[in-house]
Image (cartoon, rainbow, N blue to C red):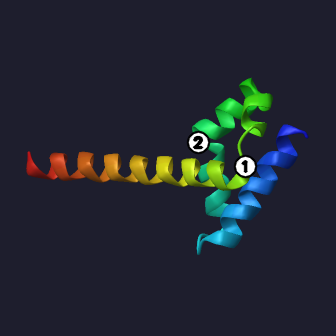
Amino acid sequence: MSNHIYAEMLIQYITDATPLEENLVRVIVSHSSFAEMLNEDEEFIGHYPLEYWAQQVLDEAVQRVRSALDALEKDSEE
């Protein structure tokens, strides 16, 4: 399966499973470690189901948001 098709399937899965808009999901997926790994080792990605990658991508996005909020909070305290 091509990288593009697998990424599109993941985007569709996350869009269908969450209230997130497709455009936002595309940005989240494209900036995730999933996208990097898909380009580097497609075979590795294929060993796990879409549900697994969806959870990984969303967990990573939440962590990035939390880190950004923590940084903003720290800046406002100074």
Side of 63 relative to 28 (left or right): left
Residue at 48% in and 51% down? 59
Callout 2–callout 1 Cβ contact below 8 Å:
no
User: Disc 1 residue type?
Assistant: Pro
Tell which tag, 2 or 1, sits nearer the viewer.
Answer: 1
Q: Describe the element under mark 2 as helix, strand or loop.
A: loop
Which residue matches tag 2?
32
Residue 43 location (% of width, % of height): 80, 29
Residue lying furthest left: 78
Q: What residue lies at 73% left-to-right and 36% top-to-bottom?
A: 45
- Residue of label 1: 49
Residue at the spot 18% in from the left edge and 46% down from the top edge: 75
Please indicate whether residue 8 sits to the left or right of residue 74 in the image. Answer: right
Q: Secondary structure at mark 1?
A: loop
Quadrant for the N terminus in the image: top right
Please tell me whether residue 48 is drawn above or below residue 44 in the rendered image: below
Does residue 31 lie above or below 38 as drawn?
below
How much space separates mark 2 and mark 1, taking CA atoms?
A: 17 Å
| Coordinates of residue 50 in the picture (x, y in percent) | 72, 52
Other-residue count near label 2 (Cα within 10 Å), few / some / many at <14 / 14–19 / ≥20:
some
As rendered, which of 53 and 28 lies closer to the eye? 53
Residue 34, given in percent of the width and then of the height, sits at: 64, 39
Q: Quadrant of the C terminus?
A: top left
State the residue at coordinates (61%, 61%).
24
Quadrant for residue 25, please give it: bottom right
Q: Amino acid at mark 2?
A: Ser
Residue closer to the observer: 16 or 30: 16
Vertical relation: 44 (above or below) 78: above
Pointer 1 local density, CA inside 10 Å: few below 14, some 14–19, many at least 20 = few
